[in-house]
Amino acid sequence: MQEQRRQTAPRVTAISELKKYAPLVYSESAAAEPFGSQRLTQALRRESGPAGAGAALIAPELHRRKEPLEAYPLDVMAMVGSLNRGGQHVALVQVDKLLHQVRAGNYLGENYGQVMKVSESEVILREIVQDAAGEWIERPAVLRLREKTQ
């Protein structure tokens, strides 16, 4: 055993040279302080001022009964046709290989989207979503007629 140990030379691979660490400079003057008094006064002004009163009017109806198509996001829905029933446009929306009739006033999608207008080629929605500050804002959305691809 001792003879084998003497004959066998250990092989050591050289370690590569370390890269110089350059710390990232943080400039707190450019960033907004999340718990600062300036941020608090802006929030209080929004709530108490006339703009805050208008923003409070935009909110989803949380206590109403949800419609079946509100369980699906808009990107899985496809408008595949339209009908004209009694002078009112009705869109045919396909979700999971099922067709649904959609009229103005119905709700679609996960973002409290209400159908504002149905035409022959598109469904125009008004979604209510929360922005980065947590306030409810309106956002337009459109579900266009899907052309059949061969």
Image (cartoon, rainbow, N blue to C red):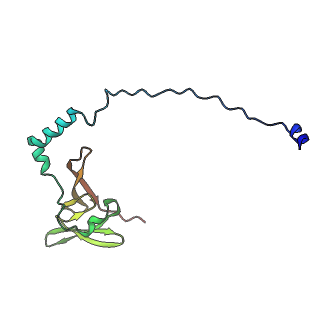
Q: Can you tell which quarter of the image residue 119 is in?
A: bottom left
Q: Quadrant of residue 143?
A: bottom left
Placement of the N terminus among the 4 image quadrants: top right
- In front of the other: 111 or 85: 111
Tag count in the figure? 0
Residue at 37% over, 65% down: 148
Q: Is residue 9 left or right of residue 109?
A: right
Q: How far from the left and from the top, in percent, is residue 147?
A: 35, 63
Nearest the viewer among 30 and 3 is: 3
Give the x, y percent position of residue 92: 27, 69
The extreme front residue here reads: 2
Identified at 13% across, 69% down, the residue is: 87
Left or right of 31: which side holds 149?
right
Residue farthest to the left, as pictured: 50
Q: The C terminus lies in which quarter of the figure?
A: bottom left
State the image coordinates of residue 132 (x, y, percent, origin top left): 27, 44
The answer to whether 121 is drawn above or below residue 8 in the figure is below
User: Residue 76 location, x and y as percent?
Assistant: 35, 63
Q: Residue at x 27, y 71 (%)?
A: 100
Quadrant position of residue 9: top right
Residue at the location (25% across, 63% down)?
Answer: 108
Which residue is at the far right? 3
